[in-house]
Image (cartoon, rainbow, N blue to C red):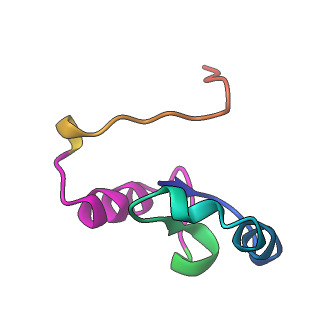
Amino acid sequence: MLSSLSYSRLYIDNMLDLYSNFDYAVLSCIEHLQKPDPAFYRLALKRAEVLPSEAIFIDDKKRIH
């Protein structure tokens, strides 16, 4: 799981124990990276130990081009 979020949001998420539902979390405020920086996605792939072709991306934002 990767997410762009602030430290204040991380505090709330930790209070809710949100990240216990995931094997790992790559969080922008911790990693000092954020979407759409490719390094952010590469870090998530590395943590998951998968190739890009083995991963899926699900977002809550509608893609606009």
Above/below status of 59 relative to 30: above
Q: Quadrant of residue 4?
A: bottom right
x and y percentages locating residue 36 in the rendered image = 53, 50
The residue located at (66%, 67%) in the rendering is: 17
Report if residue 2 lies within the magenta region: no
Left/right placement of residue 9 relative to residue 57 reads right
Task: Name the residue rendered at 22%, 43% in the picture.
Answer: 52
Q: How many marks?
A: 0
Indicate whether residue 47 is drawn in magenta.
yes
Establish if 28 lies above or below 63: below
Residues shaded magenta: 33-51
User: In what quadrant of the picture does the C terminus appear?
Assistant: top right
Going by the image, does 60 lie left or right of 7?
left
Q: Position of residue 9 (x, y in %)?
A: 79, 67
- Compared with 30, 3 (above or below) is above
- In this view, the residue in front, 19 or 64, is 19
Q: Is residue 29 left or right of residue 31?
A: right
Residue 49, image x, y percentages: 19, 60
Question: What residue sits 70% from the left and 63% below the top?
Answer: 5
Residue 48 drawn at (x, y percent): 27, 59
Residue located at (29% from left, 66% from top): 47
Q: Quadrant of residue 28?
A: bottom right
Compare residues 20 and 48 and report the one nearer the observer: 20
